[in-house]
Amino acid sequence: MSAHIDAAAYRRNGFTIVPNVFTRQETQDLQREVLRLCRGEYGAVRDLQPCPDGLADAEVMHRYIACHVVHKALPLTREMLADRRLVDAVCQLIGPNVKCVHSVLFLKGPGEPGNAWHQDEMFIPTRDRSLTTAWIAIDDADTGNGCLRFLPGSHESGILWPMHRHNDPELDRAEIAFGFPYEEDQAEAIEISAGSVVLFDGYTLHSSFPNRSADRFRRSIQFVYMRAESLLPWDQVGRGPVGDDYRDIIMVSGTDPYAYKGIADLGHAYMRKAGPTPADLRAAGET
């Protein structure tokens, strides 16, 4: 059954919440699969550490903050990104021909940092402003364990705000957007239950709180979609725009007008600890 999407709220605010897209049983299954991934049961993944015998589940996951391109490492996520309940919701917002271009699993454990203000379109550039992220809560997410927050309406201008180094230990990665005409007290915190989804526009300014809980993870997964008609001038490996059409994609709905170009295997799954990557530092002008 297709979920009802508040398309008017999406157009007005730049995001909308879709409750209970996935069942509690499905999110529990995903929690188990995430642990198996972190324990190395799905084979080699770049920067995945050997897992000592007897290491507690929380300690296993606490070694990482994210797994990028996770759909190439964890089979269940490859199924989820094409799940009709999710894809139909995206289609209601951007049209019938949709491709998935990226995925990230977040493993934000207790004490781990939040994410700085940014726009997804800054990193994954489209030509038609169709970029849409589906952020799925694997655990119940609230301000205590590091839920998302958005600046409503910040997508409307179509401006990509500049970014600079933040040097804030409570924020992950390296950069933060600045210069935009919004105050943090205008932000809306998105507290949702496991299995619910937030859909948001690639131009919407968003961030997340640090996980200040004593013992709760805030695991989530995000899939990034766009209209199949839009070229994707992106270098996923180097984290930046290029002139070519990035063809490491998955068609999830409709037809691909660029199918004659074929599909490439360019991105590969990798685990990441908290903090800036070399690509982040290059983008921040520090290497």
Image: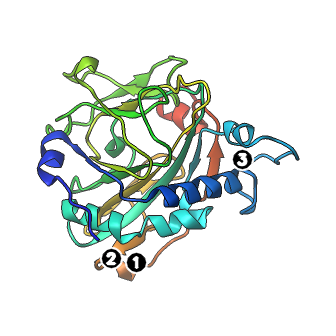
Q: Quick one: label 2 or label 3, which is nearer the N terminus? A: 3
Question: Which image quadrant is residue 43 in?
Answer: bottom right
Q: Is residue 144 above or below residue 72?
A: above
Q: Amino acid at mark 1?
A: Lys
Q: Point out the frontmost of discs 2 and 3.
A: 3
Residue 258's label in the rendered image is 2
- Screen quadrant of the C terminus: top right
Question: Where is residue 121, by image quadrant?
Answer: top left
Q: Tell me the element at label 1.
A: helix
Q: Is residue 172 above or below residue 243?
A: above
Q: Is residue 267 visible?
A: no
Check disc 3 and give the amino acid type: Asp
Badge 2 amino acid: Tyr
Mark number displayed over residue 47: 3
- Residue bearing the label numbered 1: 261
**Quarter of the image where the N terminus is located:** bottom left
Residue extending farthest to the bottom is 260
Query: Alpha-carbon neighbours of circle 3 within 10 Å: few (<14), some, or many (≥20)?
Result: few
Instruction: Specify the color scheme.
Output: rainbow
Q: Secondary structure at mark 3?
A: loop
**Residue 210 image position (x, y, % from top left):** 49, 25
User: Do the residues under discs 2 and 1 have CB atoms within 8 angstroms?
Assistant: yes
Residue plotted at (42% across, 61% down)? 101
Identify the mark at residue 51; answer none if there is no mark.
none
CA distance separating discs 2 and 1? 6 Å
